[in-house]
């Protein structure tokens, strides 16, 4: 193992002006506000969204089911947790009729900022506006508790996420480096 530094952008968005437009929630999907009984569902959506992605190198817990569950529990227990900015997206599979957890976002607050944690949409459900929808719901949640700005961090190589955030009006505020242990070849 060796220590590697991942370059990330801190991205910021003002919430005291009109928010970016959100697509309507498509018919087969349901947006669920935070409820403690949904922690496992958030963790499942987080795992399925991140397990094959770049950020697993930065945050190895995202690549394990139990790691995602532990992380979700920790986030929900923090003093700055914002349930109003935490949303789960479920999908009703038309074949089986079963509910699948396919998207999640969580919100924290500190020092007057809303902080987005782990926005994730499962691969099969991407590109239809669902990531935009979850971000919009989180932004509304932060506003509802009186926050006027929000931020997130994104790995600079995560081009899909970066493009999405910039299209919605987030600006790059600064570069930060996150150290992580990575297996060396
Ligand atoms: C980043 C992520 C959440 C985006 O989710 P998504 O549901 O694909 O996001 P959206 O569909 O809202 O936006 C993606 C693209 O679809 C397009 N789109 C939005 N609404 C659309 C619609 N109704 N129909 C078709 N395309 C649409 C957007 O214009 C956007 O295009 P762009 O790539 O040119 O910016 C998803 O890729 C993901 O989970 N990645 C892995 C985890 C991760 O890295 N998370 C971010 C950590 S910082």
Image (spheres, rainbow, N blue to C red):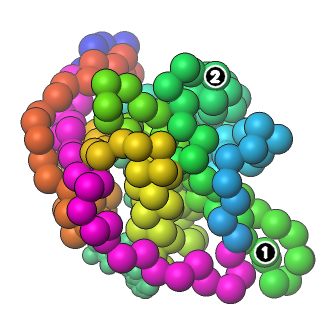
* CB of mark 2 near ligand 1 (< 8 Å): no
Above/below status of 95 relative to 108: below
- Residue found farthest to the front: 146
Residue 142, given in percent of the width and then of the height, sits at 44, 47
User: Quadrant location of ligand 1?
Assistant: bottom left
Which residue is rendered at x = 63% and y = 29% of the image?
76
Neighbourhood count class around disc 2 (C-alpha, 10 Å): few under 14, some 14–19, many 20 upward: few
Which residue is rendered at x = 30% and y = 46% of the image?
148
Asked whether residue 181 is drawn in magenta, I would say no
Which residue is rendered at x = 46% and y = 80% of the image?
23
Neighbourhood count class around disc 1 (C-alpha, 10 Å): few under 14, some 14–19, many 20 upward: some
Disc number for residue 92: 1
Span highlighted in magenta in the image: 5-29
Q: Foreground mark, 1 or 2?
A: 2
Disc number for residue 77: 2
Whole-angstrom CA distance, mark 1 to mark 2, is 29 Å
Q: Quadrant of residue 16?
A: bottom left
Residue 100, given in percent of the width and then of the height, sits at 76, 63
Residue 119 visible to the viewer: no
Residue 135 visible to the viewer: yes
Asked whether residue 20 is drawn in magenta, I would say yes
* Count of numbered labels shown in the rendering: 2
**Would residue 176 be found to the left or right of residue 128 on screen?**
left
Above/below status of 122 relative to 153: below
Residue 41, given in percent of the width and then of the height, sits at 74, 48
Near-viewer residue (75 or 101): 75
């Amino acid at each position: 193992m060796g220590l590697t530094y991942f370059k990330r952008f801190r991205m910021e968005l003002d919430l005291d002006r009109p928010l970016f437009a959100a697509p309507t929630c498509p018919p087969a999907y349901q947006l669920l506000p935070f409820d403690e009984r949904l922690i496992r569902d958030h963790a499942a959506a987080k795992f399925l969204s991140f397990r094959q992605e770049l950020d697993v190198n930065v945050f190895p817990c995202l690549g394990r089911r139990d790691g995602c569950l532990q992380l979700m529990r920790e986030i929900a227990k923090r003093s700055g947790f914002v349930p109003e900015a935490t949303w789960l997206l479920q999908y009703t599979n038309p074949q089986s009729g079963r509910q699948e957890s396919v998207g999640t976002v969580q919100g924290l607050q500190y020092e007057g900022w809303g902080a987005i944690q782990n926005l994730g949409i499962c691969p099969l459900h991407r590109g239809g506006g669902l990531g935009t929808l979850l971000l919009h719901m989180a932004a509304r949640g932060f506003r509802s508790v009186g926050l006027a700005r929000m931020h997130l961090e994104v790995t600079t190589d995560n081009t899909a996420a970066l493009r999405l955030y910039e299209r919605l009006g987030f600006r790059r505020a600064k570069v930060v480096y996150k150290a992580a242990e990575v297996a060396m070849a």
